Amino acid sequence: MKPKVRFVDNGAAGRVGALMGGLHSVCQSAHCPNRSECWSGGTATFMVLGDTCTRCCRFCSVKSGRPSAPDADEPAKLAEAVKALGLKYAVITSVTRDDLPDCGAGHFAACVRALKKIPALEVETLIPDFNCGRSAIAKLVDAGPDVVAHNLETVERLTPLVRDHRAGYRKSLQTLRIARELSGKLITKSGIMAGLGETDDEVVRAMADARDAGVELFTIGQYLSPGKDARFLPVKEYVTQDRFAAYERAGHELGFRHVASGPLVRSSYKAGEAFSKCRS
């Protein structure tokens, strides 16, 4: 059965939207089904480096094309918005910027540094692969985020169908491995979507590969097609709650410190709670 969540635009959600100012929210760009709940709680996931991606993955509603130059004032604007919202845990993600020499890592890092000046704020970053550039990933890690996340998105067999040809399953694992190697202190995180035609064995294999790369937090959610456009992949199946529960059990058996698995789970959903469980 297709999971459904009705968006409720209440006062708290409206306040978050107003405080976003000229910033981009992945909550809107990715049509996240949980944005009503998160915004009502006064939280949001911010998307830096613009709203246009240089890649075109078949699961994603973020527009692709030629992006504009990064906004030099974005780190300061981001910090102002987070302060105004009174957040204790902020998630920052970005579009992929293959057009920039460092794939946008320097700008992303500047946003993290601006946020880390806010007392007691914990920062999670959901990064693109930065083309596995070690120096680019190091820029981000050196900025001091508490969590570095990068999603596998799907199982290895389906990656060429689901993701842009410049992405890659092994490439993503290497990105996670490098981030982990560069700092033993930060927590690494990844996740996949279910319902694209993967088998249960392939899901467990993806989790095992992520664990081998040092990942400690893992998420699995139901894939929902962003729209009827031919470029978007259709849903192959709606995974049952029992199977999601089985994936969670398998993840714990593999040694993850926290696994979130369910129809409406997304990478950044209740990210602060997951971090707290992992740290305790």
Image (tube, helix red, strand yellow):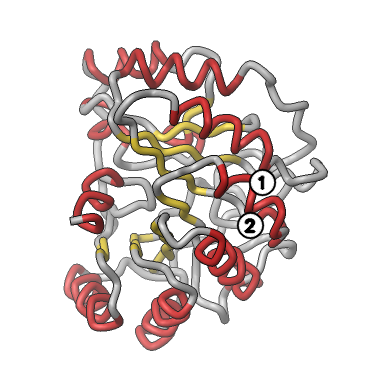
Residue shown at 79% from the left, 36% from the top: 66
Using the image, determine if residue 71 lies above or below residue 276: above
Between 106 and 96, the one lying in front of the other is 106
Between 203 and 98, the one lying in front of the other is 98
Image coords of residue 196 (percent x, y): 46, 69
Helix, strand or loop under label 2: loop
Helix, strand or loop under label 1: loop
Residue 65 appears left or right of 247:
right
Q: Which residue matches tag 2?
A: 129
Residue shown at 39% from the left, 57% from the top: 187
Q: Which residue matches tag 1?
A: 96
Q: Amino acid at mark 1?
A: Thr
Q: Quadrant of residue 243?
A: bottom left
Image coords of residue 157 (percent x, y): 57, 81
Using the image, determine if residue 234 lies above or below residue 94: below
Residue 230 appears left or right of 222:
right
**Residue mark closest to the camera, 1 vs 2:** 2
Residue 21 appears left or right of 269:
right
